[in-house]
Amino acid sequence: MHSYDYWLILAFFALVLIPAPFLGRFYYKVMEGQRTWLSPVLGPVERGCYRLAGVDPHSEQSWQKYTLALLAFNLAGFLLLFTILLLQNYLPLNPQNLPGQEWTQAFNTAVSFMTNTNWQSYSGEATLSYLSQMVGLTVQNFVSAATGLAVLVALCRGIGRKSAHTLGNFWVDMTRATLYGLLPLCLLLALFLVWQGVPQTFAQYVSALTLQGVDQVIPLGPAASQIAIKQLGTNGGGFFGVNSAHPFENPSAWSNLFEVGSIILIPAALVFTFGHYVKDLRQSRAIIACMLALFLIGGSVSLWAEYQPNPSLNNAAVEQSAPQEGKEARFGTTATVLWSVTTTAASNGSVNGMHDSLNPLSGMVSMINMMVGEVIFGGVGAGLYGMLLNVLIAVFLAGLMIGRTPEYLGKKLQAKEVQLLVVTLLVMPVGVLVLGALAASLPGPMATISNPGPHGFSQLLYAYTSASANNGSAFAGLGANTPFHNLMLGLGMLIGRFGYILPVLALAGSLAQKKAAPIGQNSFPTHGPLFVTLLTVTILLVGGLTFLPSLALGPIAEHLSLGF
């Protein structure tokens, strides 16, 4: 590693962690309707949205009504996007006259963007019109991220409130999350990306003559606006097929730094938002410490693995350097590794290199980041409510070990809450192991794998892990654009999204109704190093016990076959 690599890592953490406490407090004030510096500008717009939609911002909903509103909104978004993708050849803003998508691919894409997964089995510039990119994908990038933020806020209220029967108003939370939480940051990042050279235009694609005398079509489009929300909203779907490895999506070292940093900017800030809701910022510091510990463990393993020469290569000169296949050659190996760890830890899915070319151990780290659920920063909102589920599981295990009724911040965890937690533990195994085993047992889906042996199995395992974790990145060697994979991966995305959201909202409703007992000296502390260690071990053990056999068949077997 060179000095540039160390400065890149330091700049990345500074960009994410320094603003997090301040941005976290801002989100708390926004979601609770308190006045902020944006209120004079956006306040009238917010009130206008309520009047237009017929929403009473002062009326709150029970967890059941909150859930129904969320499901209705997401269903409407899915149907709108599905229709746009099917009929885009009849719609405007299609200067290249691109046809509509085949229905299983349209289903997969619509589910993908509605669930904040952004899995793409197509190349955006060759498949989607400007209207589909903007009205279809970009809109869903905003509202899917806002949905995750709304669910998190509902859970925070459930933990923080006492003897309450409501969790807020979904329509109000969605409006505030989008208007204050996402739009201003996206506007700033989009302007920065345009300054760096990212296209933002409705012009037709440009034809150029290469030095070899070959005609080449250079795709353009309104890319900067979509890239801004795909990063800040932890969406990840690229405007161009190769995502942020494309020089139009990621043209400079500065754009690379700000794009990768923006992936976990909001998830890190929301940890501090939770602290404000429960009136105890020590809880925030404990959670962010666990997230950073898991991130650093995975990052260290990936960096070490990617800087090891491949023993299968006999050339002595090659053996002295890290393999460069699939890396972002403009920014170096460290930049590719940092992005791969960040995007899988944050449920983002964007890439600036090819994960299919990663060292087996690096590929395994990316899989583990997703397999443990959206907990290592994770998606906007989804990451923290996934982590809070693990916090409650750790509290329950601690209660079993010391023989006390488990409680978190004064709220006792009883049979109903534990049952809901167990339901969430089944989400990833069903999406990854059940659907993945079905794909691995049929000759048709197996024929789409491009590599034999353990790496081929890793391609399939990665795809179903990515879908179920609502991540969206891929080992690109899998030919996933088939009716079977389109439908099964779409099902995995739905399981991975709503398999968490529904129990989380039910859990929030149950916790909100409980009285909070005073926290005394005999209460189990959930803010010290002991609890951070317990939480970290809980996450790794639950994920390890569940997925270790499948990892042994894929990346571990491939690593051992290299002869390190």
Image (cartoon, rainbow, N blue to C red):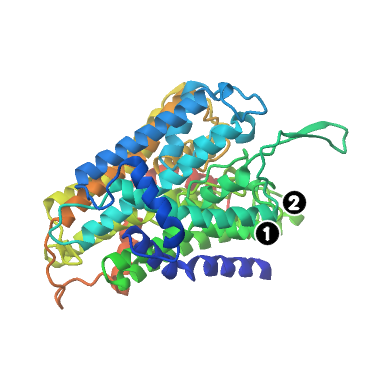
395 vs 512, nearest the viewer: 512
N-terminal of the pair, mark 2 or mark 1, is: 1
Residue 508 pos. (x, y %): 22, 52
Given the image, on which type of amino acid does mark 1 rest?
Ala
- How far apart are the two marked residues, 2 and 1, measured between alpha carbons? 31 Å
Q: Nearer the viewer, mark 2 or mark 1?
A: 1
Residue at point 43%, 41% (across, down): 465
Residue holding disc 1: 253
Residue 389: x %, y % from top left = 28, 55
In the image, residue 111 sits, relative to residue 270, either above or below, namely: above
Q: In the structure shown, which secondary structural element does the residue marked by tag 2 occupy?
A: loop
Q: Is residue 557 above or below residue 97?
A: below
User: Nearest the camera: 56 or 240?
Assistant: 56
User: Which kind of residue does numbered mark 2 sit on?
Assistant: Asn
Residue 315 picture location, percent across and down: 75, 51
Does residue 479 appear anywhere in the picture? yes
- Above or below, 242 against 258 in this view is above
- Percent of width and height locating residue 246: 67, 45
Residue in the picture at 70% in, 58% down: 321
Location of residue 256 (image quadrant)? bottom right
Q: Is residue 341 visible?
A: no
| 10 Å crowding of disc 1: few (<14), some (14-19), many (20+) | some
Report the side of 530 relative to 110 (left or right): left
* Residue denoted by label 2: 315
The crowd level at tag 2 (other Cα within 10 Å; few <14, some 14-19, many 20+) is few
Q: Quadrant of the N terminus?
A: bottom right
